[in-house]
Amino acid sequence: MSAVLLLMLASTPAGCGGARNPALAASAPATPAGTGFVSSAHPLATEAGLEVLRHGGNAIDAAIAVQAMLGLVEPQSSGLAGGAILLHYDAATGRIDSYIGRERAPASAGPAMFRDEDGTALSDAQAMLSGRATGIPGVLPALERAHREHGRLPWSGLFDATIARAREGFPISPRLHRHIAGEFPQASAADVVRLFARADGTPLQVGDIFRNPAYADSVRAIARDGAAALQQGPLADAIAARVGQAPHPARMTRQDLAHYEVEHGPALCRPLRAYVVCVPPPPSSGVGLLQLLLLLDGTDIARRGPDDAQAWLLFAEASRLMYADRDHFVGDPEFVPVPVDGLLDPGYLDSRRALIGPRAAARAPVHGQPPAAAATAADATGEPGGTSHFVVIDRDGNAVSMTTTIESFFGSGRVVGGMLLNNQLTDFSWSPGGAAANAIAPGKRPRSSMSPAIVLDRDGRLVGAIGSPGGNAILAYVGKALVGRLYWDLPLQQAVDLPNLVARGERFNGEAQRFAPALHAELSALGVEVVPGSGEDSGLHGFWLQDGQLQGAADPRREGTYGQP
């Protein structure tokens, strides 16, 4: 960040305190930058981050506090036994670092791990509830490394609010209750039922106080021992033992847990209009988000707007092309070559964009052949929507954009130390033969749709950050919001509030009722038949800096809030 912007952030009057729910207003006003900011999916998590900022912590310190609290108050979506992908902007150097804490498969993993002894493939429900679904957790190693390199306050003090809240309890929110009472398999898993039961054994209801003393004990161990608390010792042994239990047990060893390595390196960035958009490299799908935006950049979408059916047609068809490529080519680059430069090559983008017609193609597009792409088998990944996202900026202008997950709701439905275990390995492709880019292999990380983004101006100064949960719909959610902000110049909250449209393959899933009736009819006439379906529960959180003011955003579709210290 330039010295000018640093001075602007440091000298602007302090913003108003507290957290706000943007669902209460169509467009919240911008507030002075310079005091810090947090936006997350739960008020208590936002407050935990703000409290760290008030005590002199920086963006990484606050992110650790937010994640610890989210694991308590939004356990259906993320947790300390899951994974995360974090982007960090360093105001002093202008560098954006990527910390990929994606879960890894244990050494015992293989192509047949989601099959019975007789070779029959497990159902989705059987696989998600199995011990084999759990990957080696990566969120704590990623946060620990980021803290070692950028943190300001001592690690041990960043968990105090969560430990206290876990013991004191908090009221069950409507959203958490919907998941406790959900019809998906994990909601009826024995560990989940026991975790969210009243003293008489009946399920907790909205407003009931939920206490999780076991989580408090686990977090206390993490505060004392760092990521090692889950990599060795009693908690590590308990994780290995729990995934080794029926049904469909796995063999995860303490060595698997102890040898986890975080991938750390520069972000993947590309210029776009007056900006530079930065995302994590594979196995994140950030390359897909960049491809979507660059495909649209060669159209007239900027001259259109959110009430124009042709604009949404362009977005839908570019999304379908992007997903076809992403699904086929993106995997763990430690195991397969991912043609990142080829997917973003201008000539290749031109050839893909030329496939967008005046109405939706009758058949789903197939993947292209980007330069230097190796041959790979068809993908068969099924990815449910879960996860959480939050952003932080501190008073010095350092920023974090972090997406975090335990995969589907309540992960594998198995609990250790008050923590939900992830079912991340079901994000692999289960296709026979193991030749897909996202095929299962020992030590491999499954492809992730998580695509936290940080936006700079062309001089390298921080402009904004955004991201979302939502499984494979993440790319559509974040893409939609960035189109609204970068192309249609909407305030960030209004861009977040735009209807969701997830065009992938043959389907156009979306928030049909949020499109105006006339616009919905025009889209139908163009072949974009927007129908309700899976993948609509976005959780976009972000901020935008402009003219010394900060625009905050939190998705009204969830329980998110944002605020300044």
Image (tube, rainbow, N blue to C red):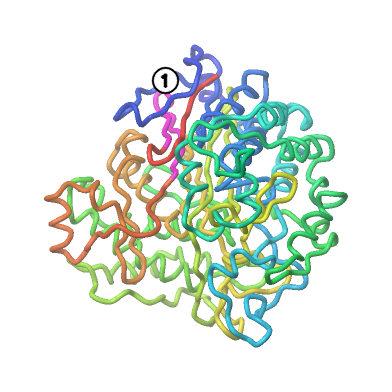
Q: 347 and 558: which one is in front?
A: 558
Q: Specify whether 268 is left or right of 242.
A: left
Q: Is residue 81 above or below residue 319?
A: above
Q: Residue furthest front?
A: 200
Q: Residue furthest top?
A: 13
Q: Quadrant of residue 89?
A: top right
Q: Quadrant of residue 52?
A: top right
Note whether residue 95 is visible: no
- The quadrant of the picture occupied by the C terminus is top right
Residue at 30% of width from left, 36% of height from top?
A: 490
Q: Which residue is mark 1?
A: 31
Note whether residue 342 is visible: yes
Position of residue 385 measured from the top left corner of the image (x, y, whole percent) = 48, 56
Residue at 29% of width from left, 60% of height from top?
A: 316
- The quadrant of the picture occupied by the N terminus is top right
Residue at 29% of width from left, 38% of height from top?
A: 489
Q: 308 and 408: which one is in front?
A: 408
User: Magenta span covers which residues?
Assistant: 539-554
Q: Specify whether 269 is left or right of 119.
A: left
345 magenta-colored: no
Q: Is residue 190 above or below residue 428?
A: above
